[in-house]
Image (cartoon, rainbow, N blue to C red):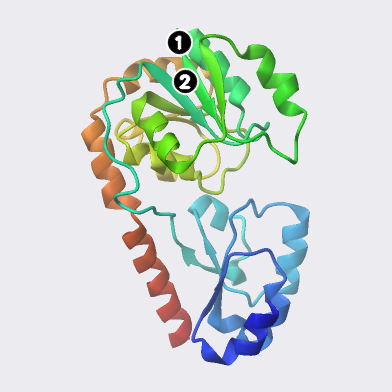
Amino acid sequence: MEDLRLRLDRFDIVHCHGEFFHAALLGPRRRHSLTTIHWRVDELDRKIFFETFPDLPVAAISAAQGAMLPASNRAGTVHHGIARDRYALQGGAGGYLAFVGRMTDQKRPDRAIRVSNAAGRPIRLAGTVDVGNPTYFEREVRPLLSDAATYVGPLGDRAKGEMLGGAEALLFPIDWPEPFGLVMIEAMACGTPVVAWDRGSVREIVDDGVTGFVVSSEEEAVAAIAKARALDRAAVRRRFEARFTAERMAADYLALYRKLLEA
């Protein structure tokens, strides 16, 4: 932040992805800045922050997240994107379901295991044990693990792509107002359909009946798994290419930069 302060005059736009010290540092330059917040924005500390800095332009990462921002802070919405060639279309021949995410009650891997068991499908779970909720995994997840429900731990990018590409579907059984959910578009890049709970950004990301299914219960998720196996994986990949590439994301941010400079 001190390096930035010393060089503020060198930049047309300062785009920050941190929380939240930069707002005070920017001072009158706030109007030529952009902030992207990668977390929920509906909690009390955020409310107090935005009341203090109503002139800080914020780019929401979903319309759902943006709706929780004060109107004075809303600069626009830019969905995330990833490099077009980061993951490749795969056939989902592994015969299993996938879950990728933090082992926490926000992401609900326990729910994913129950759904896969009810659907009669094996599941592989990947992700870190959440440092903010360290007992959750031992209490809620480990007792459900079995030969049909295996935890593979954190994965690097290549291994994650292989796991997602081999899966029949990604389960995204969230229990919080998801700001975006990057793993959904990572799965789509592999051609893998997504079965996701109707919270936060999900309806913006999943094209119901095309790239997966939006559900509201474990029973609906079980039914969706059977339907997801019949979706056209090439069509899932094409929808990713049309909506969620890094090129599209960059173009959207450039448009916001220009809008801020013109103002």
x and y percentages locating residue 78 in the rendered image: 44, 60
**Is any part of residue 219 visible from this angle?**
yes
Horizontal arrangement in the rendering, residue 181 relative to residue 83 (left or right): right
The N terminus sits in image quarter: bottom right
Does 89 appear above or below 38? above
Question: In which quadrant of the rendered view does residue 74 lie?
Answer: bottom right
- Please tell me which residue lies in front, 226 or 157: 157
Does 227 appear above or below 191? above
Residue type at mark 2: give it: Ala
**Precedes in sequence: disc 1 or disc 2:** 1
Q: Return the residue at label 2.
A: 221
Question: In which quadrant of the rendered view does residue 127 lie?
Answer: top right
**Is any part of residue 213 visible from this angle?**
no
x and y percentages locating residue 52 in the rendered image: 75, 73
Horizontal arrangement in the rendering, residue 110 relative to residue 190 (left or right): right
Residue 119 is marked as 1
Question: How many marks do you count on the picture?
Answer: 2
Crowding at mark 1 (Cα within 10 Å: few <14, some 14-19, many 20+): some
Q: Are marks 1 and 2 in contact (CB under 8 Å)?
A: yes
